[in-house]
Image: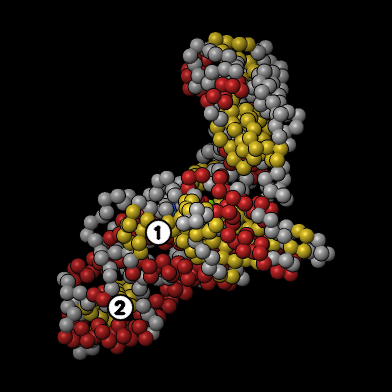
Amino acid sequence: MKITQSFIPTLREDPGDAVIASHRLMFRAGMLRKLANGLFAYLPLGLRSFRKVEQILREEMDAIGSLEIKPTVVVPGELWKESGRWESMGESLLRVKNRLGNDFVVSPTAEEAFSALVRDELSSYRQLPLSLYQINTKYRDEIRPRYGVMRGREFVMKDAYSFHTDDASLDEHYDAMGRAYRRIFKRCGLTVIPVRADSGAMGGSGSEEFMVESEIGDNTLILCGACAYAANVEKASCKKDYSVPASPGAEAAPAIEKIDTPAVRTIEELCAFLKTGADRFIKTLIYRAANVELDLSGAPGCSGLERRRPAPDAPEVYGEAFFAVLIRGDLDVNEVKLAAALKAAEVTLAQDSDVERLTGAPLGFAGPVGLGSVPVIADETVTALCDAVTGALEKDLHYRHVVYGRDFTPWLVADLRTVKAGDLCPACGGKLYEKRGNELGHIFKLGYKYTRSMGLSYLDENGKSRVPTMGCYGIGVDRTLASVIEEHHDDSGIVWPVTIAPYHVIIIPIKYEGAVKDAADALAGELENLGVETLLDDRDERPGVKFNDADLTGIPFRVVVGGRELSGDVPRVEVKSRAEKNGRLVELSLAAEALSSQVLAEMARINS
Ligand code: ATP
Ligand code: MG
């Protein structure tokens, strides 16, 4: 392809709003342009690399027996009402109406559409397992699209959904997906950190996220310095270590005592007022939980709550319930763990008015002693506190010398803390540390969540109706492509791995005329015949401009044609890989073969 016949508008300057390398370089290399906030257009060069990521995804999905289909992007709102996500997805779901006033959704993900398609065809256990995928447009009305295509509003995702008769079959496919994902990222030249995204508290390995390390990453990864433990902080657990320094034993603790704490509300203010550390306080947070599956019969304040079944086959849930959550003052509640402990679809901090109603006190004075209006859930660390301070459910009053089990007994104890750097590894006891990461892919055992709510069933060997179990598996194409650039660039531009590069070779004629033009054209033709994707810089530009653009666009191999080397007895050209500083001279007649072998060798190295 000749550059003058393509459309590669490279830029000298960085776009003003670009803060990360991939965003900057995709614009400057003429790969990408912005249509509106969070909406981007891929130009020819960008699209070529984009298609290569898609092709790797396609090959690896096909290799594990997942079948490609092409559903629509706009899907009936009815399906989302069946699953309950029409409501629960909130503002990020783009809802539209057609001319008849019917509701539709612009797919942010496709559990509903795939479940509905399979529901209509599934009748017998013989049709399972079934794994289907698409590589298709998604739309999420992100509040703050940023970092270019890393977090856009419209993007493309490879999403696969699998349906199974039993856990063993789901486990097998889930493991095959995990292996395919590792191969996909390797073929893209990416170093990923697979992290557990399942709750340690719940056991099993129901979910794994594939992260790349990134300063601007939205995720905190918890990693062990001594073993392979790696988890998203949302799900990370740590070794139990409840020792609280300077805490006397329960027997030694004086009787509970109410103390005046005028206008002291926050933990920091209390620490200063009482001159002790935050690890001696019990923080009490009131949470509202939605769709709670946990049985609350007999729990304080729950006698009037009604249970309902969101779908015919689904378990009964309480629509809404409030809880007091206790945690040591120096720690934070992990809401994902809390939701798991309550078997709740969602947990959020209660509104101020609910806190005041349920605790009978102004904000800042909640505490477990004498609290009967809600079930009390304590983090495990609270059980080790034998001389603690808590709110006294009255304005400007706290309790001190509070002893767990003597002065209050929670309704439920669970691991609810957010793990931080310095905590101990749950697997080996080593020291944990933190890294920022960006999520490129996610595999997830969904179980019966959608198959139940959307009414999927089949007849088993004995003619009995059963509900299939399900898995889902997603990778963002745009974010993967941007991450490749994040990992492979230098001060001059992109340094593509050959597997994702828009072209393998760029030919730069010093001046595109006469014998130089003839040699460059012939070499381009030879390379194309050998299957080497070649870009020919036929522009009427100074060599320096062409070299700079070649570095910027990051094509893996550069061939310079012209000058004394070309006009010598044995015509030669200079071949240089983008990653190397210096090139080497190669006889023109051997150049195409030599480049072809180099490209193939590099492909093999990355794919091995
Ligand atoms: P995030 O936490 O980053 O919003 P998510 O957990 O909501 O992502 P999933 O629903 O698991 O994302 O989607 C699967 C993949 O789709 C992600 O791993 C990511 O690669 C991609 N993706 C999700 N949201 C976006 C977005 N706004 N822009 C680009 N890619 C995205
Ligand atoms: Mg995810």
Coloured how?
secondary structure
Residue at the farthest right position: 462
Pick the quarter of the image with the N terminus. bottom left
Location of mark 2 (residue): 1
Is residue 489 in view?
Answer: no
Q: Quadrant of residue 580?
A: bottom left
Q: Quadrant of residue 149?
A: bottom left
Q: Say which mark, if any, is on residue 85.
A: none
Q: Residues within 10 Å of mark 1 (few under 14, many from 20)?
A: many
Separation of marks 2 and 1 at Cα, in angstroms:
24 Å
- Residue at left 62%, top 66%? 131
**Which residue is at the front of the view, 451 or 243?**
451
- Residue at left 47%, top 53%? 96
CB of mark 2 near ligand 1 (< 8 Å): no
Position of residue 483 measured from the top left corner of the image (x, y, whole percent): 42, 58
Location of mark 1 (residue): 482
Q: Residues within 10 Å of mark 2 (few under 14, many from 20)?
A: some
**Which residue is at the front of the view, 151 or 379?**
151
Horizontal arrangement in the rendering, residue 437 relative to residue 240 (left or right): left
Earlier-in-chain disc, 2 versus 1? 2
**Which residue is at the front of the view, 246 or 198?**
198
Position of residue 435 measured from the top left corner of the image (x, y, whole percent): 47, 46
Is residue 462 in view?
Answer: yes
**Which residue is at the front of the view, 587 or 75?**
75
> Which kind of residue does numbered mark 2 sit on?
Met
Position of residue 173 measured from the top left corner of the image (x, y, whole percent): 65, 63
Q: Secondary structure at mark 1?
A: helix
Q: Secondary structure at mark 2?
A: loop
- Residue at left 23%, top 88%? 570
With respect to residue 153, does 320 lie above or below? above
